[in-house]
Image (cartoon, grey):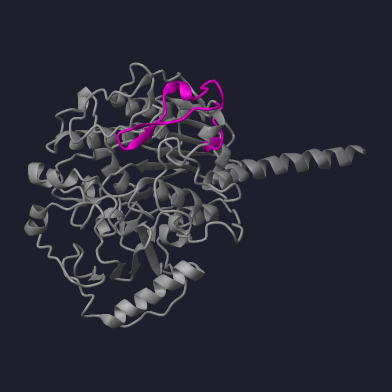
């Protein structure tokens, strides 16, 4: 090769390297913090009557944009996580959670958010609660059978060969690294790193310590001797902070998915947080969870990642049933002004805290009232990292980048909510139709309905005007048959033909 050609080649390589470096600098790191069973009213900044301090999350909201009409796909755990990581409504595939030792919910061909980001050069990690299934049968010993204990089939510790890798978990669906306990109240009670247990579970589950509010919630099965459930969140926090530190100096953007095990039951705040709020054990656990958020945000600051990191904070569904007694005992409404809790298809089951911070891009201190969904995260991030989604990916996801930048954006037409089969709700503009006799799935105490003006009805469904009735007290199903009919048609179309993206506004 001639000398000038060599110079040209070297210059080209150098220029190409500069372009790549500039592209890496412009590509944000992404951190998704996902709370577990945290209510809309547990975020202090959007509940003026809150009895729980959340200073770190409040500060995050002040430094970014807070969405007040944001929704998870389901009122329960596994489905919402699936929807967030695929950009697809869960009900197109399943409705229920993955039970103990359950299979993965992901089809091998289904593109996930971490798989997409890996293709764009990201290093990816999931630290925390997985609850999306594994192939446990691959490590089950030949002939091992579960034994019926009460209402549940329970495996003993010796039913599995714990020395073997567990397939079809986070590493099989786009994550380079995993650390967590899978599900905090399901066996096996042990740490899993990547695809192997860290310590072999050898004894049956015994709750320790006892929760400071509510029931232990733990399902029976194998446990590591000495396992303490109040140490789960501190260990996950420690690992998330350490993983962020490990990214310093790497010429590679990173994606951290940090799904908490809190404030999900068992409600087990550590001793230093017990008694630090006026909302009982749950309040203390939520206060500790806010501290965890602060630790992660501080780690981003200390290692120089703050200015080029997109942070999303949200939750998988509404608060657990203990929230009703919390209203009576501590005057704290975890659901805020909303009706319903976890599992319900009333607003309180799936309208969740949602905050996005991205310095220099997302407006600080903004409160956005537009309708958004967690299924939108995948298309939004795809646009940010310049990834062209294939036609068979992120079916229901909408690109929110214009909305994030404060530009005029096409509003979302509708959102479909669901927790169990044949029990749907559809939102369009200010209207929400519950296409079932009731939005209730979790039991509601009679005293709560009486105290809050909720009355029984004899209609086959429920219709509410959220612009006038955010607490869903006045059922307009009989009074607005035209609205009911149009929403039922829209629901059928969405379920049978796909997400609706362009539709004329109809008269109220």
Residue 505: percent from left, percent from top:
37, 79
> Quick one: which residue is furthest to the right in this view?
2
Quadrant that contains the C terminus: bottom left
Q: Could one spot residue 359 in this view of the protein?
A: no
Q: Please tell me whether the stretch drawn in magenta is mainly helix, strand or loop.
A: loop
* Residue 500 x, y percent position in the rendering: 46, 70
Q: Residue at the location (57% across, 44% down)?
A: 115
The residue under the point 33% across, 24% down is 205
Q: Is residue 456 left or right of residue 482?
A: left
Report the span colored magenta. Answer: 142-171
Reply above or below: 431 against 350: below
Along the line of sight, the residue nearer the viewer: 292 or 247: 292
- Examine the image and state in which quarter residue 251 appears: top right
Residue 401 can be seen in this image = yes
Between 501 and 18, which is closer to the camera in this rendering? 501
- Residue 105 in picture, x, y percent from top left: 49, 46
Looking at the image, which is closer to me, 23 or 131? Answer: 131
Please tell me whether residue 164 is drawn above or below residue 400 in the rendered image.
Answer: above
Q: Is residue 304 magenta?
A: no
Q: Quadrant of residue 156?
A: top left
Residue drawn where x is 53% and y is 33% of the image: 137
Left or right placement of residue 242 versus residue 117 in this view = left
- Where is residue 163? Give x, y as percent: 54, 20
Q: Quadrant of residue 266?
A: top left
Give whichever of 136, 237 is nearer the camera: 136
In the rendered image, the vertical position of residue 349 relative to residue 266, given as above or below: below
- Tally of numbered discs: 0
Quarter holding the N terminus is: top right
User: Is 161 contained in the magenta span?
Assistant: yes
* Residue 449 relative to residue 251: left or right: left
């Amino acid at each position: 090769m001639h000398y000038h050609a060599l110079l040209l080649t070297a210059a080209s390589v150098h220029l190409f390297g500069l372009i790549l470096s500039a592209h890496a600098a412009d590509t944000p790191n992404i951190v998704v913090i996902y709370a577990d069973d945290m209510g809309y009213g547990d975020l202090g900044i959007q509940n003026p009557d809150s009895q729980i301090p959340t200073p770190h999350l409040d500060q995050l909201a002040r430094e970014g944009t807070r969405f007040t009409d944001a929704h998870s796909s389901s009122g329960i755990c596994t489905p919402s996580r699936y929807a967030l990581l695929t950009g697809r409504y869960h009900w197109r595939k399943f409705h229920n959670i993955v039970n103990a030792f359950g299979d993965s919910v992901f089809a091998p061909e289904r593109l996930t958010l971490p798989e997409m980001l890996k293709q764009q050069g990201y290093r990816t990690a999931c630290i925390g609660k997985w609850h999306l299934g594994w192939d446990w049968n691959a490590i089950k010993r030949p002939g091992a059978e579960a034994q019926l204990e009460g209402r549940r089939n329970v495996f003993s510790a010796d039913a599995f060969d714990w020395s073997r890798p567990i397939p079809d978990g986070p590493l099989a669906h786009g994550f380079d690294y995993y650390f967590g306990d899978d599900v905090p109240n399901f066996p096996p009670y042990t740490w899993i790193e990547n695809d192997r247990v860290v310590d072999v579970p050898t004894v049956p589950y015994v709750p320790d310590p006892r929760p400071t509010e509510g029931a232990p919630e733990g399902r029976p099965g194998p446990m590591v001797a000495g396992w303490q459930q109040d140490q789960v969140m501190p260990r996950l926090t420690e690992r998330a902070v350490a993983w962020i530190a490990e990214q310093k100096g790497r010429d590679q953007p990173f994606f951290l998915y940090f799904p908490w095990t809190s404030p999900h039951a068992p409600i087990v705040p550590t001793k230093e947080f017990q008694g630090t709020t006026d909302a009982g054990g749950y309040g203390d656990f939520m206060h500790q969870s806010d501290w965890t958020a602060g630790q992660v945000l501080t780690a981003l600051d200390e290692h120089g990642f703050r200015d080029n990191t997109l942070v999303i904070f949200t939750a998988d569904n509404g608060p657990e049933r203990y929230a009703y007694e919390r209203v009576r005992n501590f005057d704290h409404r975890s659901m805020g002004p909303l009706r319903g809790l976890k599992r319900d298809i009333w607003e309180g089951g799936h309208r969740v805290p949602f905050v996005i911070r991205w310095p220099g891009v997302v407006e600080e201190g903004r409160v956005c009232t537009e309708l958004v969904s967690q299924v939108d995260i995948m298309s939004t991030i795809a646009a940010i990292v310049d990834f062209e989604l294939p036609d068979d990916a992120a079916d229901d996801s909408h690109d929110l980048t214009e909305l994030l930048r404060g530009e005029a954006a096409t509003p979302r037409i509708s959102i479909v909510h669901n927790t169990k089969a044949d029990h749907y709700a559809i939102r369009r503009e200010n209207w929400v139709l519950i296409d079932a006799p009731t939005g209730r799935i979790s039991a509601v105490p009679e005293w709560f309905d009486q105290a809050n003006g909720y009355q029984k009805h004899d209609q086959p469904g429920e219709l509410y005007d959220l612009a006038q009735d955010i607490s869903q007290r006045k059922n307009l199903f009989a009074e607005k048959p035209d609205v009911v009919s149009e929403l039922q048609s829209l629901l059928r179309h969405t379920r049978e033909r796909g997400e609706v993206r362009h539709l004329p506004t109809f008269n109220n």
